[in-house]
Amino acid sequence: MVAVVYSGSRTAFWKLTRNGHVVAHCNTTGINPTFVDPKMILQILNKKIVLVNNAENIKKIYFFAAGASSADRKDELAETLSSFFRYSKVFVENDLFGAAKAACYDQPGIVGMLGSGSNCAYFEGKKLIDNNFGLGYILGDEGSSNYFGKILLKKFLSKQLPEELETKFIRNFNLDRPQILERIYNKPQANIFLTSFFDFFTQNIKHEYILGLIDEGFEKYFQTYVLPVVAKYNNEDLHFVGKVAAELEDRLQLAAERHQLKIKSIIKEPILNLLKHYTN
């Protein structure tokens, strides 16, 4: 049995296969080794009966995780997974590599990631070319779901939301200023809290104010991540991967057109393409 896993900070998608066919699947809380320690990872795994029941049957795991950006993080995560899946050989890579494989397979291309976090890199067919973009949800991640959550909260707390949107925000979330600040500054996993507000954008996608925030966020994303990579590799295909890219596809296409760029593909769930690549 082979397991393929793609994990953002919020959700991890698990597919268990035998002879190339999916025999079981589940979602867990996101397993980001930057924010989730080994003890918590094991707690997450033990809560899923599908994983508990199949732990000894899985012989290989391909795990693509947000936060697995250094050799130490990858090794630590692999060791933790191996302690649970005792008979399995574990391969760990970061989520951007997984996105690149899902979009390009073994072909070169530029891959933009827009999910709970954001990034962009050139994939030369076997490996990513290193960049300095991965600054995380506090210093970076422009255009991601946690970026949009951060922007929405700032607008709400500073009384800059239009009245009708402020009313919807209060009705949907029932949060006041002390609760929001407590959750961000004094509670763990503030990044996941921020991503939880992304659906507010898709639910109010026709509102001009929301469209303005989306366009501003995507412009920052292109300026920070995409354009520097395109400048170096301007003849390569451009792909995007992630929930934000897929659910805001129309605005993403407009952002690309403003810079005379053409998007070849947008993939919402990279786990499906990764399955094809690693189990066939």
Image (spheres, rainbow, N blue to C red):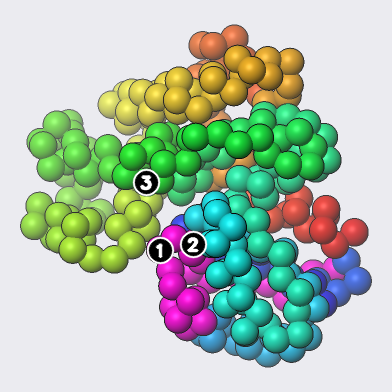
Confirm whether the magenta stretch covers residue 40.
Answer: yes
197 over 91 or under it: above or below? above
Query: Left of 109 or right of it: where is 174?
Result: left
Secondary structure found at label 2: loop
Amino acid identity at mark 3 = Tyr
Circles 1 and 2: CB atoms closer than 8 Å: yes
Query: Left of 183 or right of it: where is 268?
Result: right
Q: Which mark is residue 32?
A: 2
Which stretch appears magenta?
21-44
Q: Position of residue 203 (x, y in %)?
A: 38, 43
Name the residue carrying label 1. 35
Q: Residues within 10 Å of mark 3 (few under 14, many from 20)?
A: many
Name the residue carrying label 3. 137
Q: Dividing the image into 4 quarters, which one contains the C terminus? A: bottom right
Residue at coordinates 54% horizontally, 19% vertically from top-left? 227
Query: Left of 14 or right of it: where is 187?
Result: left
The tally of labels here is 3
38 over 190 or under it: above or below? below
Q: Residue 193 carries which label?
A: none
Q: Where is residue 139 in the image (x, y as percent from the top left)?
A: 33, 39
Residue at coordinates 76% horizontally, 74% vertically from top-left? 89
Amino acid identity at mark 2 = Asn
Give the Cα distance between marks 1 and 3.
12 Å
Secondary structure found at label 1: loop
Query: Left of 124 or right of it: where is 180?
Result: left
- The quarter holding residue 14 reads bottom right
Q: Which of marks 2 and 3 is nearer the N terminus?
A: 2
Q: Which of marks 1 and 3 is nearer the N terminus?
A: 1
Residue 203 can be seen in this image: no
Confirm whether the magenta stretch covers residue 197.
Answer: no
Give the Cα distance between marks 2 and 3.
13 Å
Residue at coordinates 68% horizontally, 15% vertically from top-left? 234
